[in-house]
Image: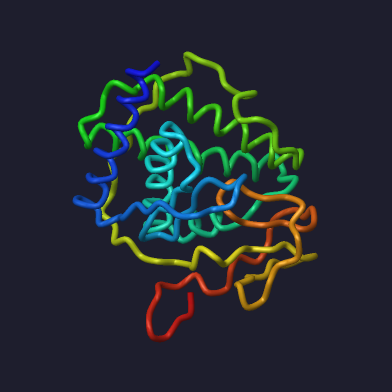
Amino acid sequence: MRALITQVRDACGAVTNHLHARYGVSVEVASIAPPLKGDLDGSRILVADHNTDKERLFLVAHLFGHTVQWNVSAELRRLGMLMPVEPTRDELDALEAYEREACRYSQQALHEAGISGLDQWLPDYSACDLAFLKHLYTTGERRAFRDFWISGQPLIEPLAIPPFKPTRWRRREQAIVFRGPQCEVHSPQSPAPPPDILSPWGCRSTKRQHFPLRPQSDLMPSGAHHRV
């Protein structure tokens, strides 16, 4: 067990350095209130200071996969910024495809960083994460993560990472709140009401709502003409 922890810790340092050196994506440790564990904005990855070594490695790799998606596809970026509540079968399939593609990018990033000894650990962790999310999305219940763990999952086929420019697409403190037929962006200047459903990455939902929803209105790169 101690050997695995050391291996995971070393791998996290290696992939963090690789993502910054090759892709310009930074990883920062931040104060994020539980039960949330991490977040992304398109140019950086934030991991909570209360995460374990295993959680941190998975989040760095997996959120990098989503970072790639956000910067190469506006459709996937919008999908990643919405908190699904009681999704339809088609919507759940789209979300699962989104998560699985991110896993393939994360496996590629680990291999690029010279990490090959965790090829079974990553699919086991990724499958557990996906099962956790699907249960949360369909029931609104946040069960213990380990309840969904099944060892020996199929290995993940790495997916070549396409060229992309890391771009900041939103502020981390902006949360998408579902209200009736639309969703709104809240910031510290306009506090959101207490949520009853929280996504793993920081989006809040106060009301059960089916897709399609209007995505965040300012999904534009940070710059002089657009507020993010």
Q: What percent of the width, then of the height, locates residue 149?
A: 57, 21
Q: How many marks?
A: 0
Q: Compared to 114, does 119 lie above or below? A: above
Q: Compared to 106, does 22 lie above or below? A: below
Residue ranking furthest to the bottom: 225
What colour scheme has been applied to the protein in the rendered image? rainbow
Q: Nearer the viewer, residue 16 or 67?
A: 16
Q: Compared to 219, does 150 lie above or below? A: above
Q: At 20% from the left edge and 31% from the top edge, which residue is drawn?
A: 114
Q: At 69% from the left edge and 63% from the top edge, which residue is drawn?
A: 177
Q: At 80% from the left edge and 65% from the top edge, which residue is drawn?
A: 180
Q: Nearer the viewer, residue 13 or 121?
A: 13
Q: What percent of the width, then of the height, locates residue 46?
A: 43, 53
Q: What percent of the width, then of the height, locates residue 205?
A: 72, 56
Q: What percent of the width, then of the height, locates residue 129?
A: 55, 33
Answer with the quarter of the image where residue 115 lies: top left
Left or right of 2 on screen, residue 38: right
Left or right of 209 on screen, residue 80: left
The N terminus lies in which quarter of the figure? top left
Left or right of 67 on screen, residue 164: left
Q: At 48% from the left edge and 74% from the top edge, which residue is drawn?
A: 228
Left or right of 61 on screen, residue 189: right
Q: Compared to 78, does 9 lie above or below? A: above
